[in-house]
Image: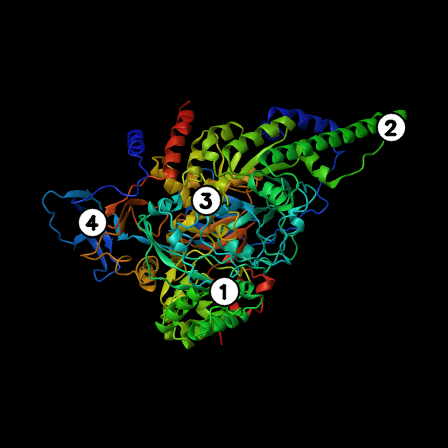
């Protein structure tokens, strides 16, 4: 809770305290569909003599990493293998934490792209805070296994950006499963996807001649939603207080009608769900920050944030992460000022939180290379960005933005054993993943492709299995 | 650092090239990847006189009065290929006022040549140019719609060569034809109907049909273009990913004595023996490895390596991106190497091979004595993302490395730095 409050703006603190007054009475953020992911048993694994990019800015040479009972059990030189441990020499190879992609649409916009599985945007109203991305995720999306091969062990699946308020996100572990519940990261918070700029106004204004059709319409649209959410929260608060007071007051208490959309929004005001906001332009990010202060909620990260470099200092001051591409630009007006130094400039600000994200089934497979590009362009400006620093952009920093940094994002004792062994320096184009562990279980082994997860969809697809007759 | 940036800003002209007339320049002690007879020269120099490569090799004397640029082992390659995209004919994808790439007449117009709209001031060109890209193929767009409705035709128009130093585009012009699902949508719903339209167009071109016949699919001008194509065994770009579409399209083209080039080719590896035996090159995206549609269930990172092994000529182009992202192509080439292709072939696939496929290997794709300099100097292996461009020479002129993007960087870096110093 302390941590939560630190990350809040002043208005948010007040609301967080009012939540405490509510106790557990308001259950809008409670998960009726909890994770069923269970860590499989695994034999201990000792990775010996590798280069370890820890994920917290440090690196270790000739280091061993012990994975045991699903956790990182030890990190250091000359560790002793416990009885029954698999010992693997990784000399010359690099070990990193499992990569975390904070922005993915795998499962909700799966491959193949079909109308039947086109489930990423509930583009039927500008605010659909009631929908949850997890209910759209198709676990058989072959994109998951390709992302795994790219070293991605945790990912946030978001609704698309057609709406001002798109719905709740889901944080998943990248494990093969037949249900989404079995992929849900145990205990991870949900996010709320919101979107700035061109997309909502195009979908509704230009597409349907309904609000919003302008950026001022966007802003008015968000505000109206938060005003509603505030009174909804107040209604529930009054009801709970009345009930708690007992006697006549309790007898006359009227239970408010539950509203799924407002449940989500009120949970954001409560501090139980953070906002993950799609926003390209610096001026719009500044307005979104003002908006969050007006209503007292937390923006965890701006996603895409093509112009984050223009307000890097402000984002750092507000403890808002920026999740960015290394080099995307030019595909629409709000992406026109994209520069390859964006990530490095955001990172340069003190106490910043720069993240490399994908928003792409291709990009998610090689976030290491995206980080490599950002590092190279930062260093060309005269910055001295090391690999052990840059790896944080795809490990610890997204973990912080998702508030799971106590569990993943670094190779430190007690963390989940989500670990990738790379053939060489992961910032090389030629580097490929060799072994990937999730909670200590070997999920990908390049030496044994038959053991690699394979989507049900790919079974019996002769097109993938050989030359054409 | 600061001095350098200020100098860059003061000299921050956006002009494509600096005046180097009558100057002799020596690029001294570089690793020369010639893509030609010279192979790779470990420690070599390039002498550029009046824009022309006058000498190249290991023991080259420095001509008197020459400006010597010390490379210290930096890598010199031919200026890179940028792939197939709307170079110079589209600026911002979502803004139709900046897009001249695509005809939406609902008619078959093989005579459409989008390169006549080429805008040498397009910022997307300069952004690619400072990343070492010298040439690419301007392609007519296909007004593809996911719902199957379309206002275009299976023949999109003609391609041309974009020259990234801003000189006008040049030929040769190839005909662009959409097969597969995109072709199906443009043809009325079925990929089979693509051939129905092509049959009619070819028959019209070869017959002495009257101009005013209502059933014609071609204009008189279109007929001329198609007749020429057929009579001269012209080249056609066949956009296709599924193995069966590739086979059908190649067979069709060969039946009409045309020279096919497969573009896309996600499943080309499955028909590699046909492609090799008929000398059909493939322009592919090495990063295509997902079954993104039912046209490409057989996508694999090993496509490039398998095709090369079978003897098929390959060039690279990104399919998922556009005119703004040509600079990513070298990364894609590096990934092909990570998945089984040898480095030399990957490098050739973004230099000499596309120059050959698209008929401009006399100008682009190789370093050779007697040619105008079209080359890029890299801090290291161009297929590594840690390597960056040091200088770019196009048509013999050293190119300015200033773009909107570098000016934005230079404007905001001091702002972040001043905050950092607090």
- The answer for which chain carries disc 4 is B
Using the image as rendered, state which of residue A162 and residue B337 is in the foreground. A162
In the rendered image, the vertical position of residue B224 relative to residue B103, given as above or below: below
Disc 2 to disc 4: CB gap under 8 Å = no
Using the image as rendered, state which of residue A150 and residue B89 is in the foreground. B89
Label 4 and label 1: CA atoms lie apart by: 42 Å
Label 1 and label 2: CA atoms lie apart by: 72 Å
- The answer for which chain carries disc 3 is A
Q: Please provide percent x and percent y for residue A441.
A: 55, 53
Q: Residue at x 18, y 57 (%)?
A: B369
Quarter-wise, where is residue A229 in the image? top right
Residue topped by disc 3: A330
Which mark is drawn over residue A250? 2
Within-10-Å neighbours for mark 2: few <14, some 14–19, many 20+: some
Asked whether, in this view, residue A208 is left or right of residue A432, the answer is right
Residue A261 visible at all: yes
Q: Quadrant of the N terminus of chain B?
A: top left
Residue topped by disc 1: B154
The secondary structure type at the circle numbered 4 is loop
Within-10-Å neighbours for mark 4: few <14, some 14–19, many 20+: many
Q: Residue at x 49, y 72 (%)?
A: B200
Within-10-Å neighbours for mark 3: few <14, some 14–19, many 20+: many
Which mark is drawn over residue A290? none
- The answer for which chain carries disc 1 is B
Say which label, 3 or 2, has the lower sequence index. Answer: 2
Label 4 and label 3: CA atoms lie apart by: 32 Å
Q: Please provide percent x and percent y for residue B338.
A: 39, 57
Label 2 and label 4: CA atoms lie apart by: 90 Å
Residue topped by disc 4: B51
Label 3 and label 2: CA atoms lie apart by: 59 Å
What coloring was used for the rendering? rainbow
Q: Please provide percent x and percent y for residue A204.
A: 63, 43
């Amino acid at each position: 809770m302390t941590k939560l409050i630190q990350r809040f703006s002043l208005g948010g603190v007040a609301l967080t305290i009012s939540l405490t007054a509510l106790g557990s009475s308001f259950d809008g953020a409670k998960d009726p569909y909890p994770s069923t992911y269970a860590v499989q048993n695994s034999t201990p694994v000792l990775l010996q003599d590798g280069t370890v990019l820890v994920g917290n800015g440090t690196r270790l040479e000739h280091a061993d990493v012990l994975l045991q009972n699903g956790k990182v059990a030890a990190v250091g030189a000359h560790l002793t293998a416990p009885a029954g441990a698999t010992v693997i020499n990784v000399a010359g190879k690099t070990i990193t934490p499992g990569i975390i992609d904070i922005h993915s649409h795998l499962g909700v916009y799966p491959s193949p792209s079909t109308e039947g599985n086109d489930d990423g945007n509930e583009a039927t109203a500008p605010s659909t805070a009631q929908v949850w991305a997890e209910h759209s995720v198709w676990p058989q999306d072959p994109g998951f296994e390709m992302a795994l091969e790219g070293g991605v062990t945790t990912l946030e699946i978001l609704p698309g950006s057609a709406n001002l308020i798109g719905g709740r996100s889901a944080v998943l572990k990248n494990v093969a499963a037949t249900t989404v519940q079995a992929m849900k990261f145990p205990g991870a918070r949900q996010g709320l996807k919101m979107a700035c700029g061109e997309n909502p106004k195009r979908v509704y204004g230009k597409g349907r001649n309904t609000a919003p059709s302008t950026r001022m319409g966007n802003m008015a649209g968000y505000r109206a939603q938060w005003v509603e959410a505030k009174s909804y929260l107040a209604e529930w608060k009054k009801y709970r207080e009345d009930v708690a007071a007992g006697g006549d007051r309790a007898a006359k208490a009227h239970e408010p009608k539950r509203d799924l959309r407002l449940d989500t929004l009120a949970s954001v005001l409560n501090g139980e769900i953070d906002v993950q906001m799609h926003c390209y332009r610096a001026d719009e990010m500044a307005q979104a920050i003002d908006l969050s202060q007006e209503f007292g909620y937390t923006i965890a990260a701006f996603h895409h944030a093509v112009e984050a470099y223009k307000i890097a200092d402000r984002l750092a001051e507000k403890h808002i992460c920026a999740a960015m591409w290394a080099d995307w630009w030019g595909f629409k007006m709000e992406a026109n000022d994209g520069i390859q130094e964006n990530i490095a400039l955001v990172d340069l600000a003190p106490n910043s939180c720069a993240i490399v994200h994908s928003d792409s089934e291709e990009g998610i497979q090689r976030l290491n290379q995206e980080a490599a590009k950002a590092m190279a362009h930062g260093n060309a400006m005269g910055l001295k960005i090391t690999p052990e620093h840059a790896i944080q952009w795809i490990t610890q920093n997204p973990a912080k933005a998702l508030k799971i940094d106590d569990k993943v994002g670094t190779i430190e004792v007690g963390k989940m054993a989500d670990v990738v062994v790379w053939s060489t320096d992961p910032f090389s184009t030629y580097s490929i993943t060799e072994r990937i562990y999730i909670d200590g279980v070997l999920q990908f082994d390049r030496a044994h492709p038959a053991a690699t997860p394979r989507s049900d969809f790919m079974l019996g697809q002769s097109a993938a299995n050989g030359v054409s007759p | 650092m600061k001095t350098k940036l200020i100098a860059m800003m003061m000299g921050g002209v956006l002009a494509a090239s600096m005046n180097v007339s009558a100057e002799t320049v020596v690029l001294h002690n570089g690793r020369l990847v010639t893509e030609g007879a010279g192979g790779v020269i470990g420690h070599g120099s390039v002498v550029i006189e009046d824009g022309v490569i006058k000498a190249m090799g290991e023991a080259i004397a420095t001509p008197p009065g020459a400006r010597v640029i010390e490379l210290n082992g930096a890598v010199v390659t031919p200026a890179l290929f940028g792939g197939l995209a709307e170079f110079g004919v589209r600026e911002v994808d979502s803004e139709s006022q900046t897009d001249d790439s695509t005809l939406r007449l609902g008619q078959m117009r093989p005579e459409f040549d989008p390169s006549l709209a080429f805008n040498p001031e397009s910022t997307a060109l300069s952004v690619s140019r400072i990343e070492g890209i010298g040439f690419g193929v301007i392609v007519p767009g296909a007004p593809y719609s996911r719902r199957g409705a379309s206002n275009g035709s299976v023949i999109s128009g003609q391609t041309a060569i974009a020259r990234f130093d801003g000189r006008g585009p040049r030929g040769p012009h190839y005909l662009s034809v959409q097969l597969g699902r995109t072709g199906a949508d443009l043809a009325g719903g079925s990929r089979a109907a693509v051939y129905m339209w092509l049959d009619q167009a070819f028959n019209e071109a070869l017959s002495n049909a009257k101009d005013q016949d209502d059933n014609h699919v071609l204009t008189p001008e279109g007929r001329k273009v198609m007749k020429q194509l057929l009579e001269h065994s012209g080249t056609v770009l066949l956009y296709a990913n599924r193995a069966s579409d590739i086979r059908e399209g190649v067979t069709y083209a060969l039946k009409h004595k045309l020279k096919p080039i497969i573009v896309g080719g996600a499943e080309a590896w499955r028909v590699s023996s046909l492609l090799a035996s008929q000398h059909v090159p493939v322009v592919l995206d090495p990063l295509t490895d997902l079954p993104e549609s039912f046209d490409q269930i057989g996508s694999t990172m090993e496509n490039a390596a398998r095709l090369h092994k079978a003897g098929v000529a390959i060039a690279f182009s990104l399919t998922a991106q556009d005119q703004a992202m040509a600079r990513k192509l070298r990364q894609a080439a590096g990934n092909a190497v990570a998945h089984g292709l040898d480095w030399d072939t990957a490098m050739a696939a973004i230099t000499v091979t596309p120059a050959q496929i698209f008929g401009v290997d006399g100008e682009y794709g190789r370093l050779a004595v007697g040619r105008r300099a079209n080359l890029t100097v890299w801090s290291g292996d161009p297929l590594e993302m840690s390597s960056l461009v040091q200088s770019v020479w196009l048509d013999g002129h050293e190119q300015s490395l200033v773009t909107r993007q570098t000016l934005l960087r230079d404007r905001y870096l001091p702002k972040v730095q001043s905050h950092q110093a607090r």
